[in-house]
Image (cartoon, rainbow, N blue to C red):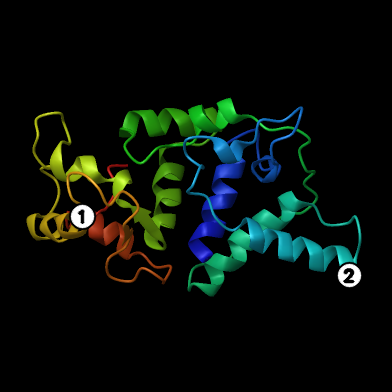
């Protein structure tokens, strides 16, 4: 769940800022970001946020925003997984609207090229160093076969695997991620320590064992 809460916060912040708009459901005036391509059948952790919000409302009603809950949950999940801590300024206000268009257009996709990812980060006022640092969040969590299949079978449209992938690692992935079917089969983003927040994600990339194209 740690990876899911970190991802939930990231997907919130990349659309309209860190305002909890990602939590809003469909209504007569809202098209939920939950139904966007990056989020549908993928984003998790909503029930955890609901539980935290209910406990806070019981203790101190109308005080802590959902946006602050997302920020704190991402920080605390990282710490509990063995990662670093950081100060989280509080006082965010919750959004009254959502942007499914922003969610579809602004959140980096697993198969985006580096220039595309850098462009999306720059829209948020972030640079290349931020791309590298935040990519390190992939040191925990899982990804579905459908998110990296092209790397195994058709990376550049020529019907072959990504040449930067370690051959033995690619073969291992192929056992559970066939050319067709198995879309929802899960694989760790960090094959060495998938539940621990450390720097092995970067070491895996240097060894040709990074899971996603991005």
Residue 20 figure quarter: top right
Q: In this view, does 175 lie to the left or right of 102?
A: left
Where 117 sits versus 68, above or below?
above
Query: Residue 195: percent from the left, percent from the top?
Result: 41, 71
Which of these two is toward me, 110 or 129? 110
Residue at 38% from the left image edge and 61% from the top image edge: 139
Q: How many labels does the image show?
A: 2
Q: Which mark is residue 122?
A: none
Alpha carbon distance from label 1 to label 2: 48 Å
Residue at 69% from the left image edge and 40% from the top image edge: 21
Label 1 secondary element: helix
Query: Residue 194: percent from the left, percent from the top?
Result: 36, 68
Where does label 1 land, which residue? 206
Can residue 151 be seen at all in this image of the molecule?
Answer: yes
Where does label 2 land, which residue? 59
Which of these two is toward me, 160 or 107? 160
Q: How many other residues sit within 10 Å of disc 2, few (<14), some (14-19) or many (≥20)?
A: few
Q: In this view, does 158 lie to the left or right of 150?
A: left
Residue at 32% from the left image edge and 42% from the top image edge: 214
Query: Residue 16: percent from the left, percent from the top?
Result: 65, 33
Q: Which of marks 1 and 2 is in front?
A: 2
Q: Is residue 154 left or right of residue 137?
A: left
Query: Residue 132: percent from the left, percent from the top?
Result: 39, 47
Residue at 72% from the left image edge and 65% from the top image edge: 51
Q: Is residue 107 left or right of residue 181?
A: right
For marks 1 and 2, the one nearer the N-term is: 2
Label 2 secondary element: helix
Q: How many other residues sit within 10 Å of disc 1, few (<14), some (14-19) or many (≥20)?
A: few
In the picture as drawn, the residue positioned furthest to the right comes out as 61
Residue 64 figure quarter: bottom right
């Amino acid at each position: 769940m740690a990876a899911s809460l970190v991802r939930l916060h990231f997907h919130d912040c990349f659309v309209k800022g860190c305002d909890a708009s990602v939590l809003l459901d469909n209504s007569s005036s809202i098209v939920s970001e939950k139904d966007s391509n990056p989020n549908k059948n993928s984003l998790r952790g909503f029930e955890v946020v609901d539980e935290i919000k209910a406990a806070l409302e019981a203790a101190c009603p109308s005080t802590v925003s959902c946006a602050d809950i997302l920020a704190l949950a991402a920080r605390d999940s990282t710490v509990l997984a063995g990662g670093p801590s950081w100060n989280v300024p509080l006082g965010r206000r919750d959004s009254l609207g959502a942007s499914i268009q922003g969610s579809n257009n602004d959140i980096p996709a697993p198969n985006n090229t580096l220039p595309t990812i850098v462009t999306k980060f720059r829209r948020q006022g972030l640079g290349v160093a931020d791309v590298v640092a935040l990519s390190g969040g992939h040191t925990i969590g899982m990804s579905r076969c459908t998110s990296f299949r092209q790397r195994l079978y058709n990376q550049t449209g020529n019907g072959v695997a990504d040449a930067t992938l370690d051959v033995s690692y690619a073969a291992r992935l192929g056992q559970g991620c066939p050319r067709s079917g198995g879309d929802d089969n899960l694989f760790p983003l960090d094959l060495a320590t998938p539940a621990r927040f450390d720097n092995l994600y970067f070491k895996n990339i240097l060894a040709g064992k990074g899971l996603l194209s991005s």
